[in-house]
Image: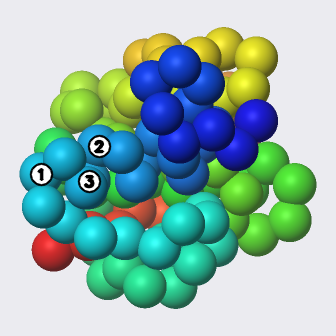
Amino acid sequence: MGGSTPAAFGGSGYLNYVFNNVGISIPRTISSIWNATKPVSTPQVGDIVFFNTSSGPSHAGIYLGNNQFIHSGSSTGVTISDMNVSSWTTRYIGARTAL
């Protein structure tokens, strides 16, 4: 949990790793990424999709298109998930762009 390298990614660590590798600086925590990015009405490939898994923005991933997103969690590692699955649709709170 909280890892920021390929050896052990946490959710925000994975986002930071990916965005830093393409020259985009984002804050370190999910809630601060939420506050520092610009809302979009419909996610586009590369946007960050956010979920409320505890209190407010607490999990996020990178939108891949076709309702799929890539994200990392302490128990799953980096994985691709379907946003249409009820465990995600009920927690989805919005998409934002870091650009």
Q: Percent position (x, y) of residue 17? A: 36, 45
**How is the protein colored in the picture?**
rainbow
Instruction: Please indicate, yes or no, whether residue 39 appears anywhere in the rendered image.
Output: no
Relative to 44, 53 lies left or right: right
Relative to 82, 23 lies left or right: left
Relative to 48, 83 lies left or right: right
Q: Percent position (x, y) of residue 69? A: 38, 31
In contact (CB < 8 Å): disc 3 and disc 2: yes
Q: Quadrant of the C terminus?
A: bottom left
For mark 2, what is the residue?
18
Q: Amino acid at mark 2?
A: Val
Q: Quick one: 8 or 96, which is closer to the camera?
A: 8
Q: Percent position (x, y) of residue 36? A: 43, 85
Relative to 55, 73 lies left or right: left
For mark 3, what is the residue?
19
Quadrant hosting residue 68:
top left
How crowded pointer 3 is (Cα within 10 Å; few <14, some 14-19, many 20+) is rated as some
Which residue is found at the position 55% from the left and 51% from the top?
A: 12
Measured in 3D between alpha carbons, the distance from the residue under mark 3 to the one under mark 2, in whole angstroms, is 4 Å
Q: Percent position (x, y) of residue 30? A: 60, 63
How crowded pointer 2 is (Cα within 10 Å; few <14, some 14-19, many 20+) is rated as some
Measured in 3D between alpha carbons, the distance from the residue under mark 3 to the one under mark 1, in whole angstroms, is 5 Å
Measured in 3D between alpha carbons, the distance from the residue under mark 1 to the one under mark 2, in whole angstroms, is 7 Å
For mark 1, what is the residue?
22
Q: Amino acid at mark 1?
A: Val
In contact (CB < 8 Å): disc 1 and disc 2: yes
Q: Secondary structure at mark 1?
A: loop
In contact (CB < 8 Å): disc 3 and disc 1: yes
How crowded pointer 1 is (Cα within 10 Å; few <14, some 14-19, many 20+) is rated as few
Q: Quick one: 8 or 79, which is closer to the camera?
A: 8
Q: Amino acid at mark 3?
A: Phe
